[in-house]
Image: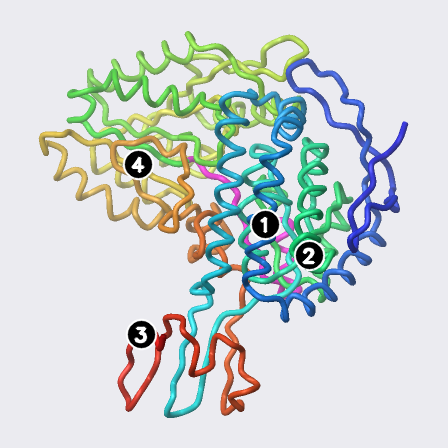
C-alpha cells in the first residue's frame, strides 16, 4: 500500500519514516485506507533548513504578496471544498452539513481573508517614529513557526489552515505544520492547496511545509531547535505542557491553547426567572459536537435551593433524552471515561451517564455529575479535571460567599459566564462574583453559553495559565493574534534609505510619531 509523502522545501517527497499509521472512522471503528508516515528527525531538520531560507526570502516579499497568498488559498479551499469536507467527515465523524460545509469551512476561509486584509494594511506592525531622536520601531516576523493542530477542528484550527497558521503567515513567517494523526488526509488536501497558492503568489515554496507525525522525543527536539523561532500548539494539557517544558528550556516562544472547564454561574434570580430555559440552553451547549470544544461549559455553579434542584433535574433529563454523539476516536472515549472516573473518585456523584456506550462507534453516554461546594473546596484540583466530551459537573454551593470561594480556587480558563436575573435582582451577587471570575478567564460572558468563538478582531480566545501559556495573547482574532509571531525591531540612527518602508518618513500608514516632544497618531498621506 502506498504511503503518502511529506511536503518539504516545496516538494512532496517520501518521508524518512520510522513507521506508518492510518486514521480511523470513529463512527464505525473502520481503518481508513490512506497510509501516512511517522517522520524521523532528518525530515524535521530538512524542513527547518528550508524554513530558514524561506524566512530570509519572505523578509523581502511585499505585504501584498503575502495577502495574495492568503486570499488565493481561501479561494482554492472553496474550489475543493467537497473533497476536503468529505475527508474531514470520514476522519472525524463530524457532520458534513452544517458543521463542516456550512460552518467550519467558511470560518476557515473567512479568517484566512481577515489575515490577508491585516497583512495588506500592515497596521498590525504598529510603527512608532520618534523624529527628533531618529529612533523608530515596528513589529516584524519572528522566523520559522511550528504549528501543532488539534483533533477537534480539522479546518479552522488545523495546522496548515487554521488561525495559528494564518496569523503566522500574515506576520511574514514560514510555517512547518505538524498534522494531527486523527485527520491526516484532510491536512494533506489542505497543504496541497496551500502550496499551490504560495507558488501562485510568488512566495518561497517552503513558506508552507507538512509533516504528519513525529515521535514524542522528536517533537520536543523540534521545539528546542535554534532554527525554530516560535511554536503554536492546540490540544491536550499533557502534550502541550510537555512541549512547553522543552521549549522553555531552550528559550523558544511557545503559545498553547489547552482548553479549560469554562465555569458558568447561574445566579438565584436567573434560576427562578428562567431556570428551565437556561438548562435547555446549557444542555445544547454541552452536547454540541459531542462536547469536544475547548470552550465547552464543563463546570456549572448554582446556589442551593428548590430552583437549583429543579434546574439540575431539567439538565439531567435533557442529557438523558439527547442522543449520544460520536467522539473523535476510541482513545478519546477512553480518555473521557478516565476523566469522569477522576471526578467521581474526587467525590462527584453521577446523575446521568458515566459509562462508555457499547459498540464499534466511539461513543460515551451523555454524563451529568454533581458535587457540593464544600466537597469542591476540599479537592479543587481534581474536581477541575476537564472532561473533554459530552459531560459536565454541577457544583451546588451553600451561598454566594461559597460560590466566590469556589471561583477563587479555579485555575485559569478560556471563558467564564454569569447568568443573572433580568430585573436586577442578582446585581449584588454579580458584583461579588464578577471580580474574581474576571481574573481567571480570558473571555467573560453574560447570559450566553461560551461554546461559540467569533472570528473578530475583538475576540480573546486565550486566558490565564493553564488554559494558555500566556494571558496576553489570543489564538483567534487578527491582527491581535499575529503578535505572537512577531518581534519588536528598533532602528536607531539608521539612514533613511536603509529603513523598512513602514518606518520611513513618507510612510502613508497611520503611525505614532513624536514631533517637538508631542506624540500624535496620524498619517502623512
Label 4 environment density (alpha carbons within 10 Å; few <14, some 14–19, many ≥20): many
Residue 401 position (above or below residue 494): above
| Element on which disc 1 rests | helix
| Element on which disc 3 rests | strand
The disc label shown at residue 165, or none: 1
Q: Please give the name of the residue rendered at 41% of the width and 7% of the height, measured from the top-left corner.
A: 321
Q: Which residues are magenta?
A: 242-261
Closer to the N terminus: mark 3 or mark 2?
2
Of circles 1 and 3, the one toward us is 3
Where residue 257 appears, x then y in whole percent? 52, 46
| Element on which disc 4 rests | strand
Label 1 environment density (alpha carbons within 10 Å; few <14, some 14–19, many ≥20): many
Q: Which residue is mark 4?
A: 417
Q: Is residue 524 left or right of residue 352?
A: left
Where residue 402 appears, x then y in whole percent? 25, 36
Q: Is residue 336 left or right of residue 222?
A: left
Q: Are marks 2 and 1 in contact (CB under 8 Å)?
A: no
The disc label shown at residue 207, or none: 2
Q: CA distance from mark 2 to mark 1?
A: 11 Å
Q: CA distance from mark 4 to mark 1?
A: 29 Å
Of circles 3 and 2, the one toward us is 3
Where residue 513 appears, x then y in whole percent? 35, 80
Q: Which residue is mark 3?
A: 522
Of circles 2 and 4, the one toward us is 2
Q: Are marks 1 and 3 in contact (CB under 8 Å)?
A: no
Of circles 4 and 1, the one toward us is 1
Closer to the N terminus: mark 1 or mark 3?
1
Amino acid at each position: 500500500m502506498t504511503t503518502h509523502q511529506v511536503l518539504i522545501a516545496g516538494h512532496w517527497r517520501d518521508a524518512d519514516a520510522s513507521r506508518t499509521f492510518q486514521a480511523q472512522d470513529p463512527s464505525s471503528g473502520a481503518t481508513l485506507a490512506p497510509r501516512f508516515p511517522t517522520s524521523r528527525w532528518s525530515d524535521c531538520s530538512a524542513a527547518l533548513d528550508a524554513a530558514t531560507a524561506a524566512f530570509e526570502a519572505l523578509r523581502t516579499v511585499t505585504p501584498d504578496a503575502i495577502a495574495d497568498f492568503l486570499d488565493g488559498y481561501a479561494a482554492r479551499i472553496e474550489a475543493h471544498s467537497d473533497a476536503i469536507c468529505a475527508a474531514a467527515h470520514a476522519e472525524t465523524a463530524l457532520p458534513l452539513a452544517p458543521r463542516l460545509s456550512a460552518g467550519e469551512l467558511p470560518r476557515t476561509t473567512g479568517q484566512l481573508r481577515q489575515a490577508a486584509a491585516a497583512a495588506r494594511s500592515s497596521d498590525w506592525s504598529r510603527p512608532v517614529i520618534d523624529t527628533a531622536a531618529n529612533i523608530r520601531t515596528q513589529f516584524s516576523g519572528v522566523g520559522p513557526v511550528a504549528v501543532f493542530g488539534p483533533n477537534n477542528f480539522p479546518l479552522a484550527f488545523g495546522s496548515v489552515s487554521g488561525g495559528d497558521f494564518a496569523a503566522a503567515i500574515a506576520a511574514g513567517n514560514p510555517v512547518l505544520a505538524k498534522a494531527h494523526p486523527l485527520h491526516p488526509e484532510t491536512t494533506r488536501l489542505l497543504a496541497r492547496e496551500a502550496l499551490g497558492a504560495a507558488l501562485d503568489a510568488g512566495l518561497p515554496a517552503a513558506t508552507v511545509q507538512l509533516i504528519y507525525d513525529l515521535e514524542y522525543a522528536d517533537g520536543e527536539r523540534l521545539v528546542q531547535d535554534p532554527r525554530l523561532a516560535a511554536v503554536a500548539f492546540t490540544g491536550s494539557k499533557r502534550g502541550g505542557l510537555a512541549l512547553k517544558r522543552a521549549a522553555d528550556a531552550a528559550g523558544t516562544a511557545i503559545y498553547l491553547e489547552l482548553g479549560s472547564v469554562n465555569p458558568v454561574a447561574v445566579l438565584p434570580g436567573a434560576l427562578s426567572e428562567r431556570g428551565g430555559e437556561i438548562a435547555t440552553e446549557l444542555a445544547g451547549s454541552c452536547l454540541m459536537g459531542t462536547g469536544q470544544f475547548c470552550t465547552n461549559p464543563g463546570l456549572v455553579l448554582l446556589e442551593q435551593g428548590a430552583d437549583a434542584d429543579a434546574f439540575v433535574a431539567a439538565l439531567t433529563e435533557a442529557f438523558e433524552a439527547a442522543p449520544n454523539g460520536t467522539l473523535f476516536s476510541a482513545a478519546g472515549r477512553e480518555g473521557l471515561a478516565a476523566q469522569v472516573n477522576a471526578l467521581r473518585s474526587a467525590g462527584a456523584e453521577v446523575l446521568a451517564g458515566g459509562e462508555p456506550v457499547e459498540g464499534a462507534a466511539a461513543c460515551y453516554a451523555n454524563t451529568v455529575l454533581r458535587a457540593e461546594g464544600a466537597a469542591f473546596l476540599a479537592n479543587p484540583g481534581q474536581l477541575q479535571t476537564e472532561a473533554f466530551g459530552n459531560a459536565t459537573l454541577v457544583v451546588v454551593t451553600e451561598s454566594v460567599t461559597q460560590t466566590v470561594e469556589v471561583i477563587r480556587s479555579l485555575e485559569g480558563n478560556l471563558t467564564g459566564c454569569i447568568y443573572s436575573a433580568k430585573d436586577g435582582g442578582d446585581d449584588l451577587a454579580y458584583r461579588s462574583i464578577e471580580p474574581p471570575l474576571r481574573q481567571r478567564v480570558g473571555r467573560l460572558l453574560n447570559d450566553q453559553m461560551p461554546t461559540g468563538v467569533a472570528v473578530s478582531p475583538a475576540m480573546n480566545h486565550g486566558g490565564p495559565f493553564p488554559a494558555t501559556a500566556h494571558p496576553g495573547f489570543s489564538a483567534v482574532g487578527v491582527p491581535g493574534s499575529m503578535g505572537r509571531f512577531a518581534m519588536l525591531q528598533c532602528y536607531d540612527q539608521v539612514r533613511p534609505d536603509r529603513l523598512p518602508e513602514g518606518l520611513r518618513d513618507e510612510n502613508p500608514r497611520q503611525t505614532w510619531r513624536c514631533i517637538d516632544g508631542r506624540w500624535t497618531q496620524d498619517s502623512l498621506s
